[in-house]
Amino acid sequence: MKCCSTLSFGFACAALGAGATLAILPALERAPLTPEALAQQPEEQSFDMEAMVAQMMKLAEPGPQHEALCKTAGMWDAKVEFQFDPATPADVTYGTMECKSMMGGRYVMGHFKGEVMMPAGKMPFEGFSINGYDNLKEQYFSVWCDSMSTKAMVMYGQGDAKGKKITYEGMNNSPMGEYPMRLVVTRESDDKLVDAFWEPNMMDPTSPDMVQTGTITYTRKK
């Protein structure tokens, strides 16, 4: 952890240096303060660099939530079922997901390859995710990018420390506008994962309820 500590200390010093410079510049442009004005200035607050770095290092340590996420490392077969109209059967496609632990177990990266159903038929589809747990915010998070967009989908969620079930929420944007999205990830066992996607009912925009539009069932490759 020495390298990480050095980097953290370096970034902190850089930030402090920039902040100090920005604070001094306006003062140089003003006339000197009178003794009366100086007496009214707040006393300088001491800054404990060692305490800050120690806290940063503590927050950087992987915990049980990270350990739970890393249990998904490996190769998975995926069955993808989506239906934007609840009254119609789901479109079914298949793919694979490779998950890897990163940076000492702090994050998990997933790389998905498969197909997606479009009006003209099936087409190749690829995407990747970075999942983790923010010790400071005490929240899980997921970042997703894929071959059918140029955006990043960022979601935050709550779940138990063992990562058995995590509910993520975020905002998705599309040509039709921005709308809320929910992703419920359930680790039914070490060899089975289920992602359930919830979105507003596109068939009934007046409805306040979200509907389940898709499910991806992952089965670990043996």
Image (cartoon, rainbow, N blue to C red):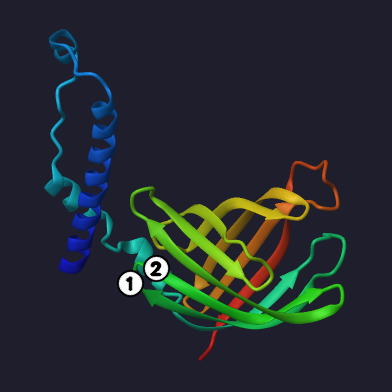
- Tell me if label 1 and label 2 are in contact, CB under 8 Å: yes
User: In percent of the image, x 76 and y 55: which residue is there?
Assistant: 175
| Residue 149 position (above or below residue 92) | above
Looking at this view, is 162 or 145 the one in front? Answer: 145
For the view shown, which residue lies furthest in the bottom direction? 222
Q: Quadrant of the N terminus?
A: bottom left
At horizontal 57% and vertical 51% (from top left) the residue drawn is: 169
Q: Which mark is residue 107?
A: 2
Q: Indicate the amino acid at tag 2.
A: Tyr
Q: Is residue 177 visible?
A: yes
Residue found at x 19% / y 20% = 42
Percent across and percent down for residue 104 are 30, 72
Q: Residue at x 58, y 67 (%)?
A: 145
The answer to which of 211 and 53 lies nearer the viewer is 53
Q: Residue 89, percent across and down? A: 84, 69
Q: Give the class, few, some or many, for how many residues have Cα within 10 Å of label 2's Cα (few <14, many ≥20).
A: many
Q: Residues within 10 Å of mark 1 (few under 14, many from 20)?
A: few
User: In this rendering, is residue 112 above or below 46?
Assistant: below
Residue 40 position, x and y percent, is 18, 12
Quarter location, residue 39? top left
Amino acid type at mark 1:
Met
What residue sits right under mark 1 in the picture? 103
